[in-house]
Image: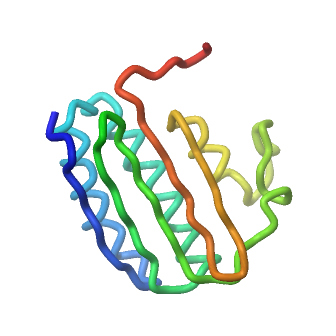
Amino acid sequence: MDEGERYTVALGNDPAEIAEVRTALRGMAIRNGFSERAGDLVLALDEVIANAQEHGRAPIEVEAWVDGRLVVEVTDVGGGFDRARVWSTHPPPPLGRRGRGLWIIRQLTDLVMIRSGEEGTTVRIEFSPDPHIGA
């Protein structure tokens, strides 16, 4: 495991920019012992960046590092949001048109943390080498 590996990039609001980040972080996951979780990482990352691009404002900073865990933070400079409106522990309504992103992210990762305020929003997702699913 290459402890200390880091990745940082600034994105605009073009969804096409996500592909390069997806490729880089999939590689980081594989190199650092998270190959079985690389697909989960890519899907969760897509959702986090898409939310930042749709609801936040550029520049959108993506920072990832390995310190035993694989950690990714996505930060935008939008006006923030009311977490209570979007944070639910229950699955979204099956016929609903929106509201699945954060729920999906929580299902795929070991930890999700959100800080949101007037200066923007940061979403942190973490993958543990030894997840305690169901614990």
Q: Where is residue 56 in the image (x, y as percent from the top left)?
A: 61, 79
Q: Which of 130 and 25 is in front in this view?
A: 130
The residue lying at 30 percent from left, 73 percent from top is: 9
Q: In this view, does 132 lie above or below 79?
A: above
Q: In this view, does 86 lie to the left or right of 107?
A: right
Q: In this view, does 24 lie above or below 121?
A: above
Image quadrant where one finds the N terminus: top left
Q: Which of 72 and 36 is in front in this view?
A: 72
The residue lying at 58 percent from left, 45 percent from top is: 112
**In which quadrant of the rendered view does residue 89 lie?**
top right
**In which quadrant of the rendered view does residue 31 lie?**
top left
**In which quadrant of the rendered view does residue 3 lie?**
top left
Figure disc tally: 0
The residue lying at 35 percent from left, 33 percent from top is: 37
Image quadrant where one finds the C terminus: top right
Q: Position of residue 110 (x, y in %)?
A: 52, 33
Q: Where is residue 12 in the image (x, y as percent from the top left)?
A: 42, 85
Q: Which residue lies furthest to the top in this view?
A: 135
Q: Position of residue 98 (x, y in %)?
A: 73, 59
Q: Nearer the viewer, residue 82 or 18?
A: 82
The residue lying at 55 percent from left, 19 percent from top is: 133
